[in-house]
Amino acid sequence: MTTMSTTSQMTPDAPQSTVALSEEDALRADIYGLLAGLVRQAPDAELLDWLGGLEIDADGTPLTQAWQALSQAAEAATPDTLERAHFRHLVGVIQGDITPYASWYRQGELMEAALVELRQDLRALGFERTTHTPEPEDHLAALCEVMAMLVTDAAKPRQAGFFFHHLAPWALQCWGDLAKVESAFYAALGDLGRAFMESESARLQEAASQSAVRIVSPAE
């Protein structure tokens, strides 16, 4: 399965490495980018058509089932309908049904300690928010974008450290909450995000166990 690339709102302030990616890692980076794009904004007609036409090898895993459900939902959806659903579920007048920020899920308020710590780590990793991005850096889409770039950089120890410190403590619950919304497309997106996070957690935990990296859960 090939994924469509999306435009990132987080950028590295230094050149990334040119290490050749495996097909598997290239796919992982693309999936992170796709998830980020779909959380940040509603899909246009081109992306909907692409999602609806995906050819998925059915192997019975939760991740494959989630891809199938998203593809089927994309076939039945329209850009206008999803524009309204995206606003209702993920933006809102004050806030949407889901508030996809680390600070909200970890501290119950926006712009809290999780964001402060994240900004410190992003600076250490050499990432910065693009000037035209209104959301704080702890938005779920931004964190998926960072993971996409870390995967592209083939920095496995850094991938594991960032994932377990800044995504694992809350993203699974956030995707699960999205999976409960009334829109079939966004519910399927929530299921896909949750299944992918579970897959990534297992993958990165195994990678970390084979290296000198020690995963330490952050204090709440």
Image (tube, rainbow, N blue to C red):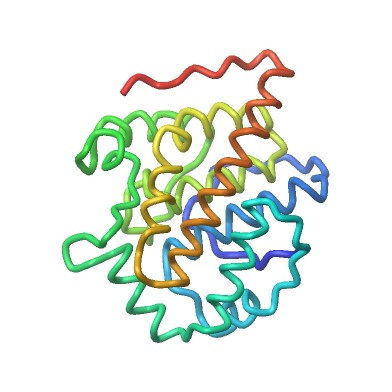
Q: Position of residue 191 (x, y in %)?
A: 51, 56
Q: Quadrant of residue 5?
A: bottom right
Residue 37 is left or right of residue 114, and the answer is right
Q: Residue 2: x, y in percent?
A: 74, 64
The residue lying at 39 percent from left, 33 percent from top is 118
Q: Quadrant of the C terminus?
A: top left
**Residue 145 picture location, percent across and down:** 53, 50
Q: Position of residue 181 (x, y in %)?
A: 35, 64
The residue that appears at 38% across and 35% down in the rendered structure is 119
Name of the residue lying farthest toward the left: 94
Q: Nearer the viewer, residue 59 or 45?
A: 59
* Residue 93 in the image: above or below residue 17: below
- Residue displayed at 74% across by 51% down: 26
Q: Residue 151 falls in which quadrant of the image? A: top right
Q: Give whichever of 101, 77 is nearer the camera.
A: 77
In-front residue for pair 185/49: 185
